[in-house]
Amino acid sequence: MSTAQLIDGKAIAQAIHSETAARVAALKTKGITPGITFVRVGEDPASQAYVRMKGKKALELGIKSDTIVLPEATTEAELLALLEKLNADKSVHGILVQAPLPKHISETKVFSTVLPSKDVDGFHPVNVGKLLLGEEGGFKPCTPAGVHELLIRSKIPVEGAHVVILGRGNIVGKPMAAILVQKAKHANATITVLHSRSRDIAEHCRRADILIAAMGQTEFVKADMVKPGATVIDVGVNRVTDANDPRGYRLVGDIDFKAVCEVAAHVTPNPGGVGPMTIAMLMANTATAAEAAA
């Protein structure tokens, strides 16, 4: 019998979207329409789906959305020149370059070229630095910011909690640690970051009040790795072959969901947990960028 309470990412994301729509409407009364431009290089199917989903949500909220699709063979110089044009365009408040990029293009250079004030994805070194220093006025990466909102709005106590983060990536793991360790409200946590070279992973996980799985390994977190009564956030998105699914695959997280539900107090479903929050934070960041430009 499942005991864990589900953290409904869809419902929380919807609440944030309602707030963003109101902010967008307020900007429009001043003659400002927030605008976001998505840049996609190549025809990666997952990237196509993500950009389509984000663009659709932007339009629903009254945000002007443009998508620029470049061929796989686009040079780094051509992409950087396009970004400089978008940086100079006052009608564009947010720029999102969809990763992954083709191997011949440096993601570091690309993310550094987007103006920090238009970097609604939160990957520019200036925004990363502000996050680490605990400074206001920078954009936080959308997925860890979304996880933070999930915890706050679900009234999961973070202050003083032992948070274990599985994964040290630049998109989730590192910024997640930086958000939760700050001397700030809804932070002040004790952080352990685990990765592929960590020893005694299961033992560390069992000490967590809040366990955040973001390593991209199918159902890695088993029930015996979870402290009874812990909160477990599943960030992983893994494709598993499934002949019964019309797509030929299904999406599975980093936790053994059914088993973990027997032990944890709060768990995010996957899908329907963290995913909707990432888009909600992106739209909120775009509204913030437009407000700052106004």
Image (tube, rainbow, N blue to C red):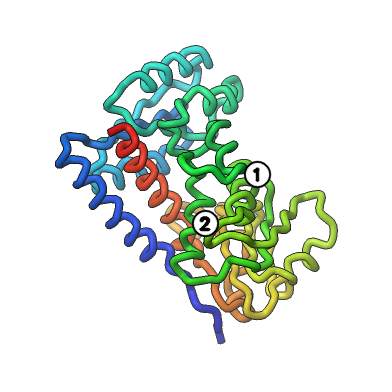
Q: Nearer the viewer, residue 128 or 137?
A: 137
Considering every residue shown, the one lying at the far bottom of the view is 1
* Residue type, label 1: Gly
The residue drawn where x is 66% and y is 54% is: 217
- Left or right relative to 234: residue 34: left
Q: Nearer the viewer, residue 234 or 31?
A: 31
**Residue under numbered circle 2:** 251
Task: Determine the secondary structure under disc 1.
Answer: loop
The residue drawn where x is 58% and y is 74% is: 258
* Residue type, label 2: Leu
Image quadrant containing the C terminus: top left
**Residue under numbered circle 1:** 169
Percent position of residue 125, x then y: 57, 31
Q: Nearer the viewer, mark 1 or mark 2?
A: 1
* One can see residue 164 in this view: yes
Label 1: few (<14), some or many (≥20) within 10 Å? Answer: few
